[in-house]
Amino acid sequence: MKKFNLIYIVAFLLFILLAISIFMKLDNSVTFYGFAENKETEINMENPIEIKKIHITTGQKVKKGDVLLDVVSSSLPIKISNAIYSIEELQTKYNLWKTDLDWRISQYTIELTNKTMQIQYEIDQLNAELEKNKKLIEQVKSISNGQKEKGSLKNPIHLKIKALNDELSNTKKIISTELNNLKSERFASNNPLLSRIKILEDELEYFKTKLERQTIFAPSDGLIGNVHCKEDEKIPSFNPLITFYEERPTLVIGYIHEELLLKVNIKDSIDVFSSSRPNIQKMGVVKNLGSRIVEIPPRIRKIKELKTFGREIIIEIPPENPFLQKEKVILTLKQ
C-alpha cells in the first residue's frame, strides 16, 4: 500500500514539473526594468548676452509662447564700436586714395596742356618761318615756279612741322589714355573700398536693430528644469540658460541584461507598467538600442548590491500618459 502511494506521489511531481516546463516554453516573454524620461531641451543663445529679467522659476509649468527671459546681447556694443571704427578707417583710406587719384588726374591734365602748348608753339614758329621764307622766295623772280614747288617738298621746315604734328598726336594719345584709365578707376562703381564700407554699414544697421532687448519664449508646453543664470549676469555664447522638459515623459530608458540582448530589436512592441502602480500601463515601441554594454543603475537591479551589466534601450511612448518623470517601470516584450 505504501509502495502504491509513493508511485502516485512521484507521478504527481513529474506532472507538475512537466506542466511548469510546458508553461515556461509557452510564456516566452522577456521582462526587464527602466524609468520614464522627459525629453530635455537646453535653451541657449549663439551670442554672448546679459540677463535683464527672469520670468520663471525651477519646476514651473509653462505654456508654449510664455516669456522665459529678457536678454540683451553683451557683445553688440563692442561690435557696433568696431564696425564704426572700421568704416571710418576705410573711409579715410578711400578719401586718401581718391585725393591721390584726383591729384594724378590734375597732373596729367596739366602735363597734356603744357606739352600740347609747347609743341603747338614750335609748330606755329615753324609755320611763321615758312611763311616768311615763302615771301622771300616769291620776290626772287629768277626762280621758276616749278623749282619753287619742288624745293618746298624738300624743305626741312616742312619735315620738322610734320614731325612735331606726329609728336603732338602721340602725346595727346598717351596722356589721354592715362587720364581715361585714372578716371575709370576713380569713378568705378565696384571700388573694393566702397564695397567693404557698404558691407560694414549693413552690418552696423543689423547690430543696431539687435541691440534692443530680446525675449526668449517657451518652445512648447512643459516644465522648467534648472535656471542656470541670474539677472544682470553676462553669459557666454552657447552656455545653458534654462533646462526645459516636456510636461509628460515620452521616452523610457530601459536596461536589458546582457544574456537577453538578442531577444529585443528596434520596432519591437513593449508593454510598459508602473512598478508602484500596476494598473497603469502603456504600449511603447523600441526606437534605439545602445551601442555598448553598461552598468545597470542600482535602482533598477533585481538585487541592488549586485553589479549587473546590460544594454541601454530607448522606448518611445505616447505623450498622453500618466507616468511621472524618472518613474520606475517594468518592461515586458512578448515573443
Image (tube, rainbow, N blue to C red):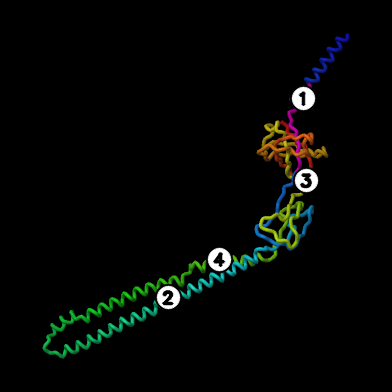
Residue topped by disc 2:
104
Label 1: how many residues lie within 10 Å, few (<14), some (14-19) or many (20+)?
few
> Magenta part of the protein: which range?
19-36
Three-letter amino acid code at the position of disc 1:
Phe
Query: Which numbered circle lies on residue 23?
Result: 1
Residue sitting at x 22%, y 80%: 158
Distance of label 2 from label 3 (alpha carbons): 78 Å
In the picture shown, does residue 117 fall above or below 250?
below
Nearer mark to the viewer, of 3 and 1: 3
The first of marks 4 and 3 along the sequence is 4
In the picture shown, does residue 276 fall above or below 123?
above
Place of residue 165 in the rendered image (x, y in percent of width and height, measured from the top left): 28, 78
Tell me if residue 32 is in the magenta stretch.
yes
Residue topped by disc 4:
199
Residue topped by disc 3:
325
Nearer mark to the viewer, of 2 and 4: 2
Distance of label 1 from label 2 (alpha carbons): 104 Å
